[in-house]
Image: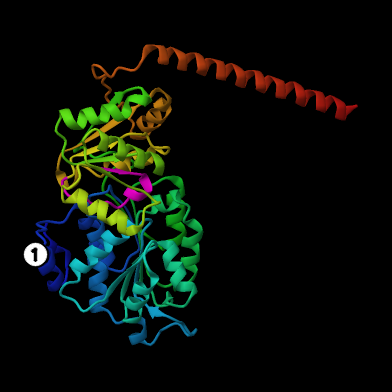
Amino acid sequence: MSFETLGLHPKLLQVVTELGYEKPTDVQLQAIPLALAGDDVMAGAQTGTGKTAAFALPILQRLMTLPSLTEQGIEDAKPQQGAKIRALVITPTRELAQQVYDSFIAYSKYTELKVAVAYGGTSMNVQIKALKAGVDILIATPGRLLDHVFVGNISLANVETFVLDEADRMLDMGFIIDINRIMKRMPAERQTLFFSATFSKQVKKLAFSILTDPKMVEVTPENIAADTVQQMVYPVDKKRKSELLAYLIGSRNWQQVLVFTKTKQGSDQLAKSLGLDGIKAVSINGDKSQGARQRALDDFKAGKVRVLVATDVAARGLDIQQLEYVVNFDLPFNAEDYVHRIGRTGRAGNTGYAITLMSLDEEWALKAIEELLDTRLPQQWLEGYEPDPSLIETVSVHRGASAEKRRAKSKSKIHQNRGKSTQRRR
């Protein structure tokens, strides 16, 4: 199959040819015809499978070929303030918003459609200027979008197509209230495209609350890691994780490594520690300004730094071509985040490596990941970095003591409740 068979406009076909797209990916092959037909779409696909083009190309074509609500004379009768956008794409993070915006700019090269992006961490004045100049398509994060809506810079009354991208991350980050506020300001008659890497019960509940007779697109099994990613777990004492990471990077000559930590402070500390070992590293997290985050990402992509240390929130949406190594310095709190993390590598058919450094107190997190993936991840003890046997014994004793304390506490509560019940009966 080729892009020509999907019924795309000649101007869009010219762009994809210039970008080197030879044939559509599975999600593009299934989603583009449905979106062009005006259907609501609920699509599940792993990161790196071409999801952005799957919704961007049909949106551009529909806006190029169909008259706007204003032109049709069916504009909302209520007076509206601000720029009247025709298509809205919501993303959970600034990095993903910028990435989607860049894609829309590239795909719309031979159209007259105007695209803008709005997210926090940058001046609103620049965004206001772009909105006043007229915008057809807006890519935004929920909080900054509502900031513009509340002060009258944007009207959502004429939105014809709404895209909720990375819906699972939206829920993880607590954006459900903002999403509901946004939904109330859009017309009921619209096309909605819903994209998510994973589909938990909560994600499905949200999808079916905002979609109308959706067409399903599921190109991979739920919550499964890509076959192109080779995974390995190295058990190691927590205090030696940084040392082991530096050893792996140096001895194996890894040149471009994306490392995940659980906390902002942890990402900064690890970048400094690697620097002391002679490995150039930078960190990105929610405490960094957008400018600092973008500079760090640009330096990493350009090869000026060897390691990019990131938290889950900051890393969602990172699109780094041919990234070979992803390291879980800390295991994630949510097992689904493991799938997102390792999805940064092994993209577009390339081979990737996902390395996990696991301390004893993280075994529960590994078990949750293995249950999600329905597989056992391979483990290997590296010579010189084997976990301290005394610590293993200490942890086992501590767990046993903790369990005994919980049982004793439970028994105490039962006796107390029985005593209270006896007193009440008296």
Residue 361 spot, x, y in % from top left? 43, 25
Q: Quadrant of the N terminus?
A: bottom left
Closer to us: 25 or 368: 368
Residue at position x 34%, y 27% in the image: 358
Q: In the rendered structure, does residue 169 fall within the stretch colored magenta?
A: no
User: What's the residue at 26%, 24% (across, down)?
Assistant: 378
Position in image of residue 233 (x %, y %): 28, 27
Residue lying furthest right: 426
Is 407 placed left or right of 328 in the picture? right
Quarter of the image holding residue 267?
A: top left
Say how many tags the image has: 1
Q: Position of residue 75 (x, y in %)?
A: 41, 83
Q: Nearer the viewer, residue 210 or 359?
A: 359
- Residue 249 in sight: yes
The image shows residue 312, relative to residue 231, as above or below, that is below
Residue wearing tag 1: 18
Magenta range: 308-322
Amino acid of disc 1: Glu
Label 1 packing within 10 angstroms: few (<14), some (14-19), many (20+) = few
Instruction: Indicate the secondary structure of the residue bearing disc 1.
Output: helix
Between 216 and 173, the one lying in front of the other is: 173
Residue 315 shown in magenta: yes
